[in-house]
Image: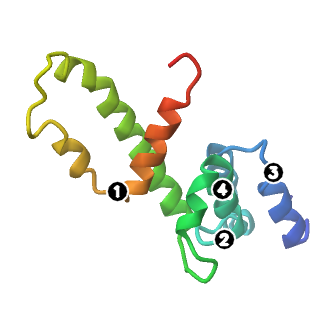
Amino acid sequence: LTDLPGELLELILCCDVLGAADIGRVSCTCRRLREACQPRGKVWRERFRLRWPSLLKYYSHSDSVSWLEEYKARHKAGLEAQRIVASFSKRFFSEHVPCDGFSDIETLGCPSHFFEDELMCILNMEGR
């Protein structure tokens, strides 16, 4: 892999068969592959696009974005959203919803569109 031209290496690493964990493992092998998988580069942007295509509308091409950090933040927001939704039935089984019932959502510390996107994913899952 390290002998391939940079453009070809990027094309391989952007392949939709590879996952985020695969890219992370590849980037740990050597300096050349770590540079090919740089956080602000095409590879992590493509990972983000493949996983959450509807979120790209929130970014401009001129923005200098750390796609690796965005990927991590969106992934973390998704896990938190799933945890919160799983707790709803226990907390809101009665007809009375407390005024502070959704305070954990408000204090997530992630962009609201990440949380909204995960809720839409949960709603669109088969079997739900």
Where disc 2 sits, the SS reads: loop
Q: Residues within 10 Å of mark 3 (few under 14, many from 20)?
A: few
Sequence-wise, which precedes: disc 1 or disc 3? 3
Sequence-wise, which precedes: disc 4 or disc 3? 3
Judged by depth in the image, the label closer to the viewer, 1 or 2, is 1
Residue 86 image-quadrant placement:
top left
* Residue 91 visible in the shown view: yes
Sequence-wise, which precedes: disc 4 or disc 2? 2
Give the residue number, with chain letter if any, for mark 3. 15
Compute the Cα span from label 4 to label 3: 12 Å
Contact between labelled residues 2 and 4, with CB atoms less than 8 Å apart: no
Residue, x 61% and y 83% (percent of image)?
A: 62
Judged by depth in the image, the label closer to the viewer, 1 or 3, is 1
Question: Residue 105: horizontal and vertical position, in percent?
Answer: 25, 45
Checking the image for residue 110, the label placed there is 1
Residue 46 image-quadrant placement:
bottom right
Compute the Cα span from label 2 to label 3: 14 Å
Residue, x 49% and y 31% (percent of image)?
A: 123
- The type of residue carrying mark 2 is Gly
Judged by depth in the image, the label closer to the viewer, 4 or 2, is 4
Question: Residue 85: horizontal and vertical position, in percent?
Answer: 33, 30
Residue, x 65% and y 63% (percent of image)?
A: 45
Residue, x 90% and y 71% (percent of image)?
A: 5
Give the residue number, with chain letter if any, for mark 4. 49
Give the residue number, with chain letter if any, for mark 2. 41
Q: Residues within 10 Å of mark 2 (few under 14, many from 20)?
A: some
Sequence-wise, which precedes: disc 2 or disc 3? 3
Compute the Cα span from label 4 to label 2: 13 Å
Where disc 1 sits, the SS reads: loop
